[in-house]
Image (spheres, grey):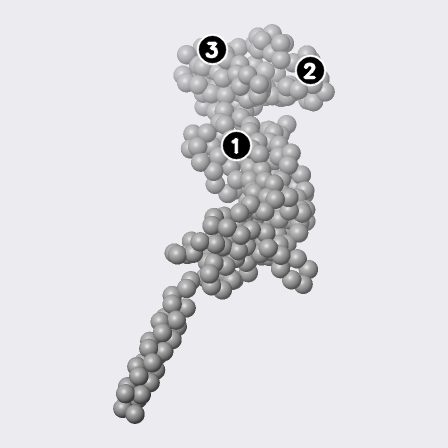
Amino acid sequence: MKTIRIIASALLSAAIVMSSATIFSAAKTKTPTLKASNKSKSISLKWSKIKGTKTYTLMYKKGSGYKKVYSGSKTKFSFKKPAAGKTYTFKVKGSGKYSKAVNIKYLKPAKNLTAAETFDMKGILLKWSKVKGAKSYKLYRSVKSKNSFSKIATVAASAKRQYLDTGLKSIESYKYYVVAVNGKSKSAKSSQAHDIYGYYDRKTDAPMTLTIKKGSDYRDIYEKLDKYFATGLVSWKSLNTKIVKVDSFGIFKGVKKGTATVLATVQPGVYKNNKKKTVNIIVTVK
């Protein structure tokens, strides 16, 4: 009897040890963290790696249940051809439980983003196409001298899909892109739009130059403008009247030595090729 009791006690102890080890092992099993983001033509899914896990299973909600879309050792997956404006729900697991479900609305990148200097020289006007499912649009701008993007505005989807960027520096290069937003869901970046504020010709980016003497008048500007403007009423604006002044007849006056920009603007429909509206004249006063 004593021998039987000893054996029974040993078996019970072993069972307790095995049970404890199983509980401890289960406690150590981690659940992967899943993240989703919109790309140009897909939804990118990434999850954290679990040590010792060789196979991950990714599911997405379809109807009232879930459908498996991936099973393997990788920790990322590209969900192809999602429907624009549709919300998708995903979850992933390793050897343990499924992760917390992640919802994402697929938003396509905004198309046809344009950036063009306004005729009245108030700034650069941005326009873009509607994105299905978007509730707002975030606009980002980069200045060539800084070479980095920062957000400049948020436009509600209910408003016009346009934004006037003002307070810009003359003869400075600006780049833009737009991101469609709905809650935590964001589209991929749109293609960039580019404009150089204050240049008459965006193909060559070359302003007109003029040198005049301090204290003297210059009256022959129309002869130089003939290759830019066919005809029409020209309006004038000096961006630095302390260096050079210009009156309504296009007569320049050198005030003091230095360099300043004068804008010569003609009404639309009267300039050559129906494209050029404003000539930037870089005036050097000596």
Q: Residue at x 67, y 39 (%)?
A: 129
Mark 1 secondary-structure assignment:
strand
Near mark 2 (Cα within 10 A), the count class, few <14, some 14-19 or many ≥20, is: few
Q: Is 167 located above or below residue 11 in the figure?
A: above
Res. 87 in view: yes
Amino acid tagged 1: Lys
Q: Residue 273 carries which label?
A: 2
Q: Is residue 273 left or right of residue 185?
A: right
Res. 122 in view: no
Q: Residue 28 carries which label?
A: none
Does the residue at mark 1 contact the one at mark 2 (Cβ under 8 Å)? no
Amino acid tagged 3: Thr
- For mark 1, what is the residue? 175
Q: Single out the mark in the foreground, 1 or 3.
A: 1
Picture coordinates of residue 273, whole percent (x, y): 69, 15
Q: Is residue 277 left or right of residue 253?
A: right
Numbered label tally: 3
Does the residue at mark 1 contact the one at mark 3 (Cβ under 8 Å)? no
Mark 3 secondary-structure assignment:
strand
Q: Residue at x 35, y 71 (%)?
A: 21
Q: Single out the mark in the foreground, 2 or 3.
A: 2
Residue 17 versus residue 140: which sits nearer the camera? 17
Near mark 1 (Cα within 10 A), the count class, few <14, some 14-19 or many ≥20, is: some
Report the quarter where the N terminus lies. Answer: bottom left
